Image: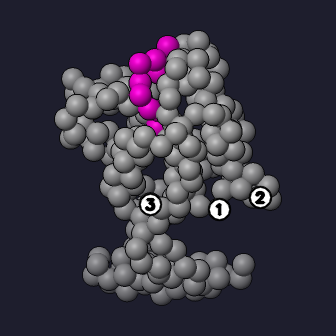
Amino acid sequence: MKIAITGANSGVGTILLRHLVSRAGIEVVACVRSARAAAALPACSRISARTIDYENHEGLAAALSGSGCVVHLAGILFESPTSTYQKANVDATRAIVGACRNAGIPRVVLVSVLRADADSTNRYWSSKGRAERLVAESGLAAAIIRTPILLGPGMAGARAIVRAATQPTVTLLGGGRHSIRPLDVDDLSRAILHCCEMTDTRAAVYELVGPEPTAYRDVIARTAALMGHQVSVRSLPV
């Protein structure tokens, strides 16, 4: 089986690559945006690096050609002067869907986020919801995986927790009393691989969360305890 991954150099992409190459019989097309990112990918005979441009539709289809499934990880959490939610989260997904159709790729797996909603007033959640809609209405066999905060090496959510846990005092919105269900990035990788291997021809949405609901402040406190100290939590009104 050949699986193409966009955003292969991301935190999730790097760990997913490790899971995929540990399985016999899987070849990976690792898609990134620059030659520098391609050079930083793991050296493995079953990983083929491709530099892609989402605006070059013919080139994108050619890069993905021959794959049985595309895992679309690429996207942004924060906008910048050079990248917007529309461009990175919506337009890139539209380009992937079109490339899959043009290259005859039957299946796509989109990694999204909990609370994604095209009608949300939150611009990030709205962009992810619109990306989901493009995939769901594409006519392709598809799996959309909505994720919570991810824990593991290189994960932004994990870095934020560790950064807060290292402080003697941290100020959180609402005192950090909101409940979260953190997900281990290795579990996400296993779920992605399972979705790649599915034969269901429908478009399905899966909300994948960790097994334990926990207050955000408690996650920080437990992390601090593992590091051998305590952290005091102050509340900032929402």
**Inter-mark Cα distance, 1 to 3:** 15 Å
Q: Nearer the viewer, mark 3 or mark 2?
A: 2
In the rendered structure, find residue 115 and report the number of the disc placed on it.
1
Query: Where does the image place residue 238, in percent across and percent down from the top left?
Result: 72, 78
Q: Which is nearer the N-term, disc 2 or disc 1?
A: 1
Please name the residue that numbered disc 2 is placed on: 120
Q: Is residue 54 something one can see in this rendering?
A: no
Above or below: residue 205 compared with residue 39? below
In magenta, the rendered stretch is: 62-72
Does the magenta run of residues contain 64?
yes
| Dot 1 alpha-carbon crowd within 10 angstroms: few under 14, some 14 to 19, many 20 or more | some
Three-letter amino acid code at the position of disc 1: Arg
Provide the residue designation for mark 3: 150
Figure label count: 3
Q: Are marks 2 and 1 in contact (CB under 8 Å)?
A: yes
The answer to whether residue 90 is above or below residue 66 is: below
**Label at residue 175:** none
